[in-house]
Structures are given as C-alpha cells and as structure tokens.
Image (cartoon, grey):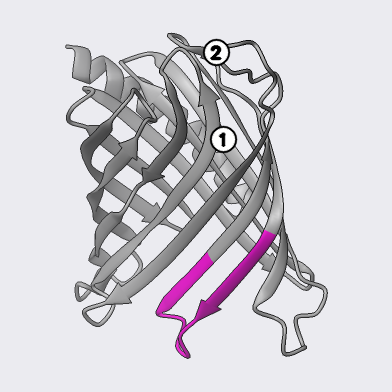
C-alpha cells in the first residue's frame, strides 16, 4: 500500500514536471528508488548551452509516500571567449537550496569560481572541474563564531560507451561547511550513475528510456562518517 501511494504521488508530480520540462527543454527526468531509505526520488535536469556559456539546473524531490523534501541547484557558466584558445575556461555562478520536513530548510549557498571543461572529439566523453568560493550565510562553529566563508570543488563527467548502449555519468563534490551538531567540517559527496539506453534496441529508436541506477557515496553528509546508498530506477531523455 505504501509503495502504491508513493508511486501515485510520484506519477502525478512527474506529469506536472513533464509539462514544465517540455517548456524549458529539460534534458532528462529520473525516478530512483533508494533501497536503504525506502524512498523514491524524482529528478529533473536541464542543460542548455548558448553563445555566452551554458545554464544547468536540477530539482530533486523525495517521496515517502508524500513529498518530504525538495532540493535544487542552478548554475551558470559564463564564457564570452568561446572562439578563443581559452574556450575551456569559464566563470561559474551557482545557487543551492532546499527544504526537508525532518531537517527544515537546508543552508542556502552561493558559489562563484572558475570551471575547466573538455570533451572528446565525438562528445562521447565530457568532463569539467570547478574550484569555487562558497558563501553559506548564518553558519557558525561550536563557539558561535561565524563560518560563512568556505570553498567547494566539483567534478562532473559523462561517458557513453558500448556503442552508445551504456552511459556512465555523475559528479563529485568536496566542500567545507561547519556542522557543530555533527562535529564535522569537511563533506564529500558523489553520485555515480550507470544507465542502459533502450533506444539502441532495434525498433525502439524513438524511445529515449534508460534503466539503471546510482550509488550515493558520502562522508559527513547525512551523518558523521561514510555512507553508501544504492538506488535503482529509470530515466527519460529529451
């Protein structure tokens, strides 16, 4: 009964997200079941390049079965020199934030820095790394001293292989954030994903469905120490 209610809420939400995705030219919609937390998460991602750089955002929503959390990130790469030999370098701007019924509001974060990006000749492999200053307003250490000024390093990758049948993608974040209630200061998080692309099946060329999953790897994120949380699901790419 619980999983049926969860899937009903997810389906209704995804129909609304699908309309928004069509309007904003979203890149993909994902639905993943976290086997450890017994939680379903939907993700909408959009990446859109233009003459002056690119825009990326994603929105995560958790269901157990009602919506219990939401988180989003939006970033902008500025590169006014795309035709120069320095086109691999861009200025990065980002905002992160969200809500959770258990934890309340996540700390809003404002980030800025530089991004190095690259790709193979056929774009089957893409990667980027960003080094950023991270402002987390109102954060304090155990003594009540303000600790708003921090840093973050982010790596992102995407690899298509096996003649396009498979995609290995994901990100890695390492940042400083004072958490006196947890006794920690440095946080690592990564979500490597592996997908099998069903549009490679003969006659399914227009069905942009992928099946697979991810493993959320973190240290000092959910709690002190290391955690690995696998999830299985599906993805529709636009």
Rounded to the nearest angstrom, the CA distance separating label 1 from label 2 is 28 Å
* Residues drawn in magenta: 114-128
Residue at horizontal 22%, vertical 38%?
Answer: 228
Q: Is residue 137 above or below residue 237?
A: above
Question: Sequence-wise, which precedes: disc 1 or disc 2?
Answer: 1
Within-10-Å neighbours for mark 2: few <14, some 14–19, many 20+: few
Report the side of 80 relative to 76 (left or right): right
Report the side of 81 relative to 196 (left or right): right
Report the side of 225 relative to 100 (left or right): left
Circle 2 residue:
142
Circle 1 residue:
72
125 magenta-colored: yes
Q: Nearer the viewer, residue 238 or 121?
A: 121
Quadrant holding the N terminus: top left
Helix, strand or loop at disc 1? strand
Within-10-Å neighbours for mark 1: few <14, some 14–19, many 20+: some
Q: Quadrant of residue 79?
A: bottom right
Q: Is residue 212 above or below residue 81?
A: above
Q: Nearer the viewer, residue 96 or 62?
A: 96
């Amino acid at each position: 009964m619980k999983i049926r209610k969860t899937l009903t809420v997810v389906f209704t939400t995804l129909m609304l997200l699908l309309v928004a995705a069509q309007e904003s030219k979203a890149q993909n919609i994902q639905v993943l079941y976290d086997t450890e937390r017994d939680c379903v998460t939907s993700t909408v991602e959009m990446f859109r390049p233009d003459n002056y750089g690119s825009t990326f955002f994603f929105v995560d929503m958790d269901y157990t079965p009602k919506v219990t959390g939401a988180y989003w990130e939006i970033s902008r790469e500025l590169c006014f020199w795309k035709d120069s030999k320095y086109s691999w370098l861009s200025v990065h701007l980002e905002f992160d934030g969200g809500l959770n019924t258990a934890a309340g509001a996540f700390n809003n974060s404002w980030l800025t820095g530089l991004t190095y990006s690259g790709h193979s000749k056929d774009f089957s492999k893409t990667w980027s790394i960003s080094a950023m200053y991270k402002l987390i307003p109102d954060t304090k250490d155990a003594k009540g001293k303000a600790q708003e000024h921090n840093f973050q390093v982010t790596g992102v990758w995407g690899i298509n292989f096996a003649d396009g049948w498979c995609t290995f993608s994901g990100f890695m974040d390492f940042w400083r954030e004072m958490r006196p209630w947890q006794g920690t200061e440095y946080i690592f998080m990564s979500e490597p994903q592996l997908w099998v692309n069903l549009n490679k099946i003969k006659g399914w060329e227009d069905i942009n469905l992928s099946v697979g999953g991810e493993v959320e790897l973190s240290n000092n994120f959910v709690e002190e120490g290391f955690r690995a949380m696998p999830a299985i699901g599906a993805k529709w790419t636009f």
